[in-house]
Image (cartoon, rainbow, N blue to C red):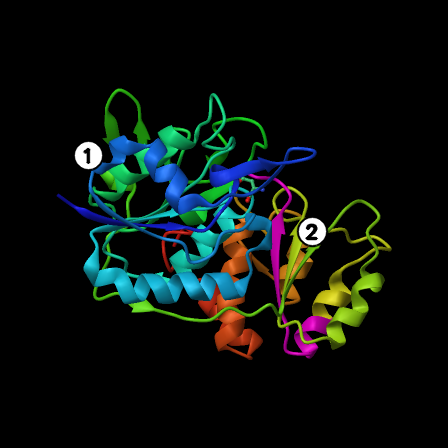
């Protein structure tokens, strides 16, 4: 039988309603939920650890560092890992782990639930069983198993607050579907080359800026004198930005002069950023901005958080960002 380590980190999965107004709070899990899903004992030899237990909106770089350290220490002792996590920031954590554990040779599966395990019609039980079964299979990457889909972690985005099909895979096909049978699409999976490489650390010196019609770049000028090392401008459509009186080019040029890297993503979910397509974006490209191509914003931000922890030079941050690390960007 395969050996699986479950790391319970919190989220709705194990939450319980608290009196007087039934607000959902993290429950006292270990004792409760294992008993509620006894059938998982038939899937694998399972150990459970609770590195922390919180609503995932509280997850920060410290929690990611804890996860990376725990996984690294236990990597040789288990065949696969399941991380139970809140859905709100699951895509960020999946991306962060994929950039921290390169050349992974074992499945590292994140799952959670939209409705607590203790509630009727909960999706927690099914998601957990699916995640454990997938973790016993040969999947050499960080994946999210949720709503009967297997998604590459750094391509996933939470796109529904209410549907049991909460995640969508952006600009990349699924790794598998779980129905009557488990169908895995091996051609879509990573092929690790070489030994596991653990890259610790994350920096918060990253700043996303969401552009909207009428957004005034001058309001953001103070950030050019801050400790931010990399900006992620979230532009329109293919990554376009305005070139009228609310022109972002001086901001982009100013960032370059201060050794800060500028990346351009899109407010649209699907499709690829192409800064050559329209005049505004093309000028930004000439001014040194880099398009994030088909990457999710979650993947782009966590990759920048990783890069900013290791580099001060805008040029090196740009150069390493454009390389594919774990299937997050098309080569
Ligand atoms: N607020 C919860 C969390 O992310 C939502 C969930 O788990 O679905 O922790």
Q: Which residue is drawn at 66% across and 51% down?
A: 234
Q: Determine the secondary structure under disc 1.
A: helix
Q: How crowded is mark 2: few (under 14 residues within 10 Å), some or many (20 or more)?
A: some
Q: Residue at x 41, y 61 (%)?
A: 67
Q: Nearer the viewer, mark 1 or mark 2?
A: 1
The C terminus: image quadrant: bottom left
Q: Which residue is drawn at 64% across and 33% down?
A: 22
Residue 212 placement, left or right of 27: right
Residue 223 placement, left or right of 260: right
Residue picked out by circle 1: 42
Vertical placement of residue 170 versus 206, above or below: above
User: Is 270 in the magenta?
Assistant: yes
Where residue 109 appears, x then y in whole percent? 34, 46
Magenta-highlighted residues: 254-271
In three-dimensional space, the C-alpha distance between marks 1 and 2, rounded to whole angstroms, equals 59 Å
Residue nearest the viewer, comparing 331 with 56: 56
The N terminus: image quadrant: top left
Residue 261: assigned label: none
Residue nearest the viewer, comparing 150 with 65: 65
Where residue 9 appears, x then y in whole percent? 45, 51
Residue 279: assigned label: 2
Q: Which residue is drawn at 45% across and 32% down?
A: 117
Vertical placement of residue 89 versus 323, above or below: above
Q: Quadrant of ligand 1?
A: top right
Dot 2 beta carbon under 8 Å from ligand 1: no
Q: Determine the secondary structure under disc 2.
A: helix
Task: Answer whether residue 295 is visible to the viewer in this image.
Answer: no
Dot 1 beta carbon under 8 Å from ligand 1: no
Q: Residues within 10 Å of mark 1 (few under 14, many from 20)?
A: few
Counting residues from the start of the chain, the first of labels 1 and 2 encountered is: 1
Task: Answer whether residue 50 is visible to the viewer in this image.
Answer: yes
Where residue 237 appears, x then y in whole percent? 64, 41
């Amino acid at each position: 039988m395969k050996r699986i380590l479950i790391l319970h980190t919190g989220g709705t999965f194990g939450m319980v309603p608290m009196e007087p107004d039934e607000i959902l709070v993290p429950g006292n899990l270990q004792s409760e939920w294992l008993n509620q899903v006894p059938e998982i004992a038939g899937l694998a030899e399972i150990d459970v650890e609770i590195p922390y237990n919180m609503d995932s909106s509280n997850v920060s770089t410290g929690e990611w560092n804890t996860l990376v350290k725990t996984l690294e220490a236990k990597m040789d002792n288990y065949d696969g890992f399941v991380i139970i996590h809140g859905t709100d920031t699951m895509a960020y954590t999946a991306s962060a782990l994929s950039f921290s554990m390169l050349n992974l040779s074992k499945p590292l599966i994140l799952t959670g639930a939209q409705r607590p395990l203790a509630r009727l019609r909960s999706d927690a039980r099914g998601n957990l069983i699916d995640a454990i079964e997938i973790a016993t299979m040969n999947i050499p990457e960080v994946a999210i198993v949720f709503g009967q889909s297997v998604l590459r972690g750094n391509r996933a985005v939470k796109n529904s607050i209410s549907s049991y099909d909460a995640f969508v895979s952006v600009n990349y096909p699924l790794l598998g579907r779980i129905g009557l049978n488990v169908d895995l699409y091996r051609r879509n999976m990573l092929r690790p080359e070489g030994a596991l490489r653990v890259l610790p650390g994350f920096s918060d010196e990253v700043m996303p800026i969401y552009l909207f019609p009428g957004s005034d770049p001058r309001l953001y000028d103070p950030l050019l004198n801050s400790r931010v090392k990399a900006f992620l401008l979230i532009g329109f459509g293919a990554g376009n930005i305005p070139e009228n009186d609310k022109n972002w080019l001086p901001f982009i040029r100013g960032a370059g002069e201060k050794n800060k890297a500028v990346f351009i993503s899109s407010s649209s979910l699907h499709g690829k950023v192409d800064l050559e397509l329209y005049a505004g974006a093309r000028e930004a490209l000439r001014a040194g901005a880099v398009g994030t191509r088909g990457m999710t914003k979650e993947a782009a931000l966590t990759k920048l958080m990783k890069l900013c922890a290791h580099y001060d030079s805008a040029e090196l941050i740009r150069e390493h960002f454009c390389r594919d690390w774990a299937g997050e960007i098309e080569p």
